[in-house]
Image (spheres, helix red, strand yellow):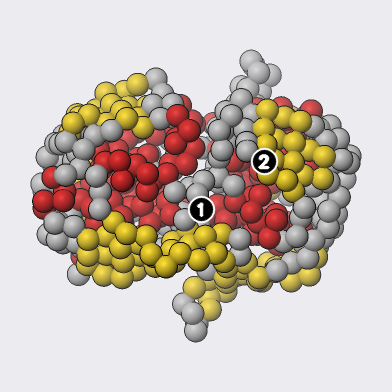
């Protein structure tokens, strides 16, 4: 039976915390560890349902992956004995991405270059998400991909389950119709198997974890502006990979600290990748006060500590802004929690150019508006975003998560400043990205 979470308003949040390892980086570390030669050790791995789905897919293809708890450092580690670029085995059953769009889309790029046929699917949510965006360029490279899901053969969209017949791939130059790190990464990973140079051109930069990690493990690739190129056939060795804390996970507690008066929170070891730190720009423009300290570069990724201290006076300084354009790919996962903050800012906040939100774990435009409206927020739906009127006093309500982890966590933070109790149904989904969320929230309110 799905669990629910009860949230009561609090007077302050205080403490020093670390958030789990970055989900995007953990996925990619598993993939490149499996494709490298020799041992890869992943430190601070995000041991969540999504990332375990990625690990299980590679286990089905013959890769030895061991996940264990490091008792001395109190984080999850992974040891992988890589099979090399061409060492994967034909899976004995359908690969299951569960609820992870990153898993199904990125692994499809790898499967496209194998010498075997495979099938990959996911849960009902994944089976409703569009896959043409990866199928189209992978077909251009020579792979055979068929969508077997609902609506197969009707219209031009492609839905999971996907049947992928790997082929000897040819390189392409592909201009992405919209910025998407998942599509870019699927093509680049397929490019490892192509004979020659594969080039991806983005309309605006999206998160670059794939490029950074490929470079870190020794793959020669070129990045210039919005263009990335990779030459196929490059073997590489396994390496130790240290995963920073997930900035998308940290965002819930940054904004909680900004909303709850008299808060004093330090979040250690947070990834500050410049293609992911759009949340900082949004918060600065809204007038929020926080500090980024002790920055360093580890395993090709920048990280830092964040300090959030506020008072009632500082909460009153928050103001509505317009958010759109090139900033959207850098905050796409944080928009639900930004919407919560916007309900408490003076004036109007407009979020636009975010149509991608409609094809996440839920239609996040509709679900954010639906659930925050239950709490008394004033929000209008836009075709590609929303308009939020502040500041509004929120009230406790019965909230549906729609099986979407980011909706569940965002509404939990909203509940901290609402009058009365907020009850969020179906919070098991939080485990897909942030195991321990409820425990950390309790620590800061104790």
Mark 2 or mark 1: whose residue is earlier in sequence: 2
Q: Which mark is residue 182?
A: none
Q: Which residue is mark 2?
A: 224
Q: Secondary structure at mark 1?
A: loop
Looking at the picture, tell me which residue is in the foreground, 62 or 212. 212
Q: Is residue 409 above or below residue 384?
A: below
- Helix, strand or loop at label 2? It is strand
Measured as percent of width and height from the top left, residue 204 is found at: 55, 33
What residue is rendered at 66% in x and 23% in y? 152
Residue mark closest to the camera, 2 vs 1: 2
Q: Nearer the viewer, residue 293 or 411?
A: 293
Crowding at dot 1, Cα within 10 Å, few <14 / some 14-19 / many 20+, comes out as many
Hey, which residue is sitting farthest bottom in the picture? 72
Crowdedness near tag 2: few (<14), some (14–19) or many (≥20) residues, C-alpha within 10 Å: few
Label of residue 273 in the image: 1
Rendering quarter of residue 79: bottom right
Question: As rendered, which of 300 and 394 lies closer to the eye?
Answer: 300
383 left or right, relative to 296: left
> Residue 346's image quarter?
top left
The structure residue drawn at horizontal position 31% and vertical position 70%, both measured from the top left corner, is 16
**163 sits left or right of 99 in the view:** right
- Residue 158 is situated, as x and y percent measured from the top left of the image, at 65, 26
Instruction: Calculate the distance from the C-alpha at mark 2 to the C-alpha at mark 1.
Output: 17 Å
- One can see residue 256 in this view: no
Q: Residue at x 48, y 62 (%)?
A: 303
Q: Is residue 211 above or below residue 361?
A: below
Would you say 375 lies left or right of 292 here? left
- In-front residue for pair 261/381: 261
């Amino acid at each position: 039976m799905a669990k629910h979470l009860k949230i009561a308003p609090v007077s302050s949040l205080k403490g020093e915390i670390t958030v789990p390892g970055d989900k995007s980086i953990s996925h990619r570390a598993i993939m490149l560890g499996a494709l490298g030669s020799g041992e890869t050790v992943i430190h601070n791995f995000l041991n969540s349902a999504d990332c375990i789905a990625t690990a299980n897919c590679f286990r089905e293809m013959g890769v030895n992956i061991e996940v264990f708890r490091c008792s001395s450092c109190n984080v999850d580690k992974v040891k992988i004995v890589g099979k090399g670029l061409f060492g994967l085995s034909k899976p004995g059953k359908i690969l299951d991405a569960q609820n992870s769009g990153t898993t199904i889309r990125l692994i499809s790029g790898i499967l496209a270059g194998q010498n075997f046929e495979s099938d990959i699917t996911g849960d009902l949510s994944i089976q409703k998400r569009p896959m043409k965006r990866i199928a189209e360029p992978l077909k251009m490279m020579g792979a055979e991909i068929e969508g077997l899901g609902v609506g197969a053969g009707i219209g031009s969209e492609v839905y999971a389950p996907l049947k992928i017949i790997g082929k000897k791939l040819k390189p392409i130059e592909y201009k992405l119709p919209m910025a998407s790190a998942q599509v870019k990464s699927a093509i680049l990973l397929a490019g490892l198997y192509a004979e020659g140079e594969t080039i991806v051109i983005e309309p605006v930069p999206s998160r670059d974890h794939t490029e950074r990690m490929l470079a870190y493990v020794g793959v020669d690739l070129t990045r210039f502006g919005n263009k990335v190129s990779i030459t196929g056939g490059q073997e590489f060795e396994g390496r130790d990979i240290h995963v920073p804390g997930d900035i998308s996970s940290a965002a819930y507690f940054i904004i909680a600290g900004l909303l709850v008066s008299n808060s004093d929170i330090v979040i250690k070891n947070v990834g500050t990748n410049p293609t992911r730190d759009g949340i900082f720009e949004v918060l600065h423009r809204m007038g929020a006060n926080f500090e980024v300290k002790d920055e360093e570069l580890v395993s090709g990724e920048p990280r830092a500590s964040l300090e959030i201290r506020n008072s009632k006076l500082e909460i009153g300084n928050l103001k509505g802004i317009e958010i759109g354009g090139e900033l959207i790919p850098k905050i796409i996962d944080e928009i639900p929690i930004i919407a919560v903050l916007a309900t408490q800012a003076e004036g109007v906040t407009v979020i636009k150019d975010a149509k991608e939100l409609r094809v996440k774990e839920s239609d996040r435009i509709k679900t954010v508006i639906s659930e925050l409206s239950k709490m008394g927020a004033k929000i209008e739906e836009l075709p590609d975003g929303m308009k939020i009127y502040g500041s509004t006093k929120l009230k406790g309500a019965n909230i549906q998560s729609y099986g979407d982890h980011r909706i569940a966590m965002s509404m939990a933070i909203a509940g901290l400043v609402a009058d009365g109790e907020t009850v969020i149904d179906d919070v098991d989904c939080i485990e897909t990205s942030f195991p321990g969320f409820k425990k950390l929230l309790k620590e800061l309110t104790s």
